[in-house]
Amino acid sequence: MTPQAGTVSEHSPLRFLDPAVLARINNLELVARTVVEGFISGLHRSPYLGFSVDFAQYRQYIEGDDIRQIDWKVYARSDRHYVKQYEGETSTNVYLLLDISGSMAYGSGSVSKMEYARYLTASLAFFAQRQRDRVGLTTFAAGLVDKLPPRCRREHLSSLLHLVDKAKPDAGTAFGKPLQALAETIRRRGIVVLVSDLYAPTGEVAESIRQFRFQGNDVIVIQVLDPREQRFDFSDSVQMVDMETRRKLIMDPALARADYLARLESHQQEIRNLCGALGVDFLVMETSRPLDLALYRYLSTRQKSR
Amino acid sequence: MQFLNPLFLVGSLALIAPILVHLVRRETSRRVLFSSLMFVRRTTKASLRKQRLRHPLLLLLRMAALLLLVLAIARPLLTDPDAVGLSGSGGRSLILLLDDSFSMRFGDRFERAQAQARTILGGMGPGDRVQTVLFSDSTRLLNRPEANPREVGKLIDALEPGYSGTDYGPALRLADQLLAGTSQGSPEIHWISDFQESGWQPGSPNVSIDDRIELRAYPAAQAPGPNVSIGRLTVEPENRSASRVAVTAEIRSQNLRQALNPALVLEINGQPARNRTVRLEPNDSRQVRFESVTVPRGESTARLHLQFEDALPQDNFAYSSLSPPPRLKTLLLGADRRDHYYLNRALTASPDSSLDVKVAEPGRIPPSELSSYAAVILNNYGPVQAETASALIRFVKSGGGLLLISGRQTHVESLGGLQEILPATLLKRYRAAGRGKDQRIGLLQKRHPIFNHFEDVHHSYFMATAYTDFYLVEPLADSQVLAALQDGSPLLLERQSGKGRVLLFTSSLDRNWNQLPLQSVFLPFCQEMVRYAARFRPSPQAYRVGDRVALQSLIPQWAKALATLSTSGHSFAHTWTVVAPSGREIPLEDPFGENRSSLKLTEPGFYRFRVQETENLLAANLDPRESDLRAPDPQQLLAQLPRTARREGAAPPQPTSVDRRHVLENRQHLWWYLVLTACLVLLVESLLANRYSSKVTD
C-alpha cells in the first residue's frame, strides 16, 4: 500500500515543521532529526504502522559488527555475544543525489531551493540511517562535486550531513557526466533519490534516470521549485540575470509570464511522462511545503524494494 | 507678461526628463536574479515599447507639473497698468526718495526737502511718472505712479517728519526694485535727505543700484548747526525695593561755537527732583551722575531735561520708567528646610534679585496655587504624590518653569507621573568610591543663556568643582544636555514641555554631594537657572522710538491690570486704551491676540496703557544716533554706491519691507497659483500611479 501524502493532516499538531521554521535551526542534524521525529510520531498515529525499528531476531556477533549492537543481557545469560537485528535491517543502499547547481540558490522567500534541498537530503539520510539503510551522497553541478559511498555507521551519517551542510551552489547543471560516473560505481541495487530543480534539457535528465533504472535501482525524482518559479509574478519591467549562466535579459514579466508557465509545464510534463514510463516516482516539492511527502515516497519505495 | 527670473525658464528643458526616463527605462530596469532563464523567451522590443507607452497620461501629468514649477520659479510678472505705470508711459520714471527721519526736524531741513521735491515735480514733462518713497528706519510708499505732479505735491506738503532713526539701505533697494521693471523711458531716483552718516546702518543689506538708473542727491541741510542732546539715561535701583535710585546720563554736544554750562533738570513724576549743570565743550560727551533719588511706591516716571535752545529741541529730553522691576515668584519645595540653606540664600541674597522665593514643605501648598508662581523648584524632594505630579505637569505645560534638584530623598521610583515631563530618566545614584573617583565638569554649553553671562574665568570655577554623588540618567531624545561630567554623565539637562520648561540638576545644591555652593559662581548660577526655567526677561526701563514692543512681553509688568480685567470679566476690546506721548489714542482691539501682537513706538515720551482705573507706563526715547548730524558729501556717497549691470526685466533682490512686498507681490502673485496647481497635478499623478501600480501587483 502506498501511503498518500495527505495521510497526516496539515492541521494536525503532529504536522511537520514548516521549512521557514526549520531555516532558523542552524544545525542540519537537528533539522533532520526534527523532521524525521515529527514524521515518525505522525506515522504512529496513522494506519501505516511497523517499520524498520521493530525487533526481528538475534544473530551471533561476527567480527566487524558494531560492539554497541551487542545485547549484554543475553551475553550475561548465555555467555555468548549476540547482536540484535531489526525488521528494517535489510541493508538497502540509498543513493542521495543532490543538485548544487547555481539555479538551486534561488529563493523568493525565507528558504532557498538549496536550503530546502539540504533539509530534504539530510532528513532522508537521517531517516534512512534510522532504518539501518546504508546511505551515500553525491553532490553535483556541472560535474561531480563530492561523493560519499553508502555506509550504515553512525559516524558516516555525521560525515554525510557535514557534506550536505557545506554544499554550496556551483555554476551550471549537467546531468550526463556526473551521474554516469556515479552509475558506474553502483555495485549493489538500491534506491536512488535525485533532488534537483531539473533545470536541464529533458533528454539529459531522461538519460540519467534511465541509466539508474536499468541497473535495477528504484528511483525517486524530487523536483524542488520555488513558489515564484511556479507563478512568475514579477511586476513591472525587470532585467533578469540567470543565476547559472549570468545571462541578462530585459523583459516585461507581464508579457512573458504565459509563455514561461507554458514552457515550464511542458518541461515538467515531459519528465512526468518519462518517469511514468520508467516506473519512477516523480515528485514536485515547492519550498513552502513541509517535507513529509518526500519521506512518504521514500518509505513507500523502500517497501517495494524490500 | 514678463518674467522676473527669465533665466530659470531654461529649466523647462527638464521636461525632457520624464520622456528620457521612459525611453531609457529598459536600461535602468530593476535587476532581478532568477534561477534560470531557460523557460523565458526574449520579449520583443516592440512589445516593450508598447508597454512603456501604457501610461501616457502619467507622462503628461509629470511634464505638466514640471512645466508649472519652472514657470513658477521664473516668477511671471503681471503687467498691471497701474503698477507698472512708471515704465509704461514712454517718459521718465521718477522715484522721489524723501527722508522723514527725526534728524530732518533740525531747523528747516524738512521744509527745504519739501521745496526741493516740489522743484523736481515742477520739472516733470508730459509722459513722466513719479512715485514717492518715504523713509526713516522703515520705508513707505506715499503714492502709486502718478503723472500729475500737483497731486503728489499736495501729498508731500501735508507731510511732517517723524521721530524715527534712519536707514538708507532698504529705501534705495526699494527704489531700485520699483524701477527694475522699467523698460521704457529713463529711470531716475531723486534722493532728498540730510545724508546723515549714521543713516548707513551696520546691519543694512548690501545695496546696489542698476547702472541704467540715474541717481541724484539733494542735500536738505546746509552747514550743520549746534546741537546738544541726551545720549542715554540710566536709572539703577540702589536697594531691592527700588525706593532709591541712582540716575546717570550721557550728554553730548556737537558743533558748538564755544563751551557751555547748560542746566539739567531731573523730574520725578513731573516734579523737579534734582538740578545740576554740566560743562560741555564744542564737540563733547559727558557722563553725569545725579544724587540718589527717592522714588514713591508704584508707577513712577523720570524725565531729564537738558535746558538749551537749539534747532533740535526734542533730543534734549530723555525718559525712563521707574516702576520696580517685576518679581519672579518662585516656590521652593523640599522635605527638609535645611537642604535649602545654600540654595535659598543664593536666590535671595543679592539686593537686586528679581526673585521672590517662598519656601514650603510638600503638601503645604495646594496644587491649585501653583499657577500663581512662575517657577517651582523641587529640591531634594521625596516621593511625589500623584496629585502633586499632575498639578506640576499642568503647571509646566501651561508655561511654568520647573527645576528638579537631586538629593538624598530623590528616588527613581518616587518621581511618579512627574517622569513624563523630565528631560531624562533617572537610573541610579553614583557614589564616588574614594578619592580620585569623584567627577568634574567636562562639558559646559557656554553659549547657553544660563552660562553666557559668565566669563571664562568663571567657567573654570564650574570646572574645578568635584562631584562625589550624582544621579546617572538616560536623557530623552528631545532634551538638551547643558552640562556634563567628565565621564559623559549629564549634570544639567533641559527639556521643553508644552509651553513650559523643565531643568534637571542631577547632583545636589548643597555641600553633601559637591562643593559648588562654596564657589563664587553658585549664586548667579542658581538665579540664572530659575530665570531661564521661568523664561524671565525683565523689560527695559525705556524703549527706543521705532521699536516694536511685543505686548505679550509686557504681561509681567501689567499683571495688576490684567488681574483687574480678569476679575471684572470685561473684554480687552472696550477697556484697554493706549495713549501716545502726544495724547493720540491708539486703538488696540485685541492687544494679546494674534492680530495685534506688537505696538510700534513712534514718538518719544511716555506711552500710557489704561485699563479702567489702572495705568501702566512705558518710556520711549529717541535714537541717539539721530542727534549726530555729521554728514558726508552726498556726491561722494553717490560715487561709492555700487552699481550693477542688470539685464532688462531681471529679478530684483529680495524685498525687505512690508510695503515693498505688498507692491511687488501684487504683481508677481501668479507664481503662487502655479505652485499650487503643480501640487494638485502631482497629487493626481501620485493617485494615478498608485492605482496603476496596484493593478500590476494584483
Image (cartoon, grey):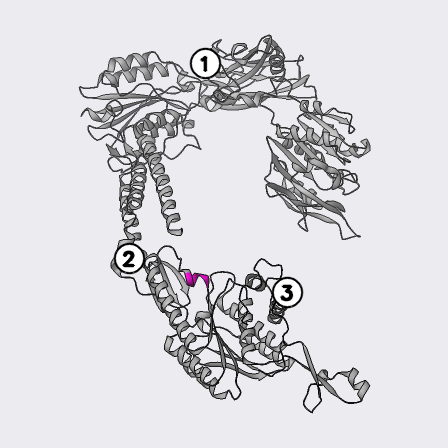
> Residue at image x 25%, y 24%?
B94
Q: Nearer the viewer, residue B595 or A218?
A: A218
Local SS, label 2: helix
Per the model, the C-alpha gap separating discs 3 and 2 is: 56 Å
Under mark 1, the amino acid is Asp
* Placement of B307 over or under A49, stated as above or below: above
Under mark 2, the amino acid is Leu
Q: Please give the residue where the numbered disc 3 appears in the rendered image.
A: A45
Query: Is disc 1 in the same subunit as disc 2?
Result: yes
Under mark 3, the amino acid is Arg
Instruction: From the image, state whether disc 1 or disc 2 is nearer to you.
Output: 2
In this orientation, does residue B258 appear?
no
Q: Nearer the viewer, residue A167 or B246?
A: A167
Instruction: From the image, state whether disc 1 or disc 3 is nearer to you.
Output: 3
Instruction: From the image, state whether disc 3 or disc 2 is nearer to you.
Output: 3
Circle 3 residues within 10 Å: few <14, some 14–19, many ≥20: few
Q: Nearer the viewer, residue A39 or B272?
A: A39
- Measured as percent of width and height from the top left, residue B267 is found at 59, 11
Q: Nearer the viewer, residue B462 or B378?
A: B378
Q: Please give the residue where the numbered disc 2 appears in the rendered image.
A: B48
Local SS, label 1: loop
Q: Which chain is mark 3 on? A: A
Mark linked to residue B512: none
- Measured as percent of width and height from the top left, residue B55 is found at 30, 48
Q: Quadrant of residue B240?
A: top right
- Measured as percent of width and height from the top left, residue B331 is found at 72, 27
State which region is magenta. A226-230
Q: Which chain is mark 1 on? A: B
Q: Please give the residue where the numbered disc 1 appears in the rendered image.
A: B310
- Measured as percent of width and height from the top left, residue B668 is found at 31, 30
* Placement of B228 over or under A2, stated as above or below: above
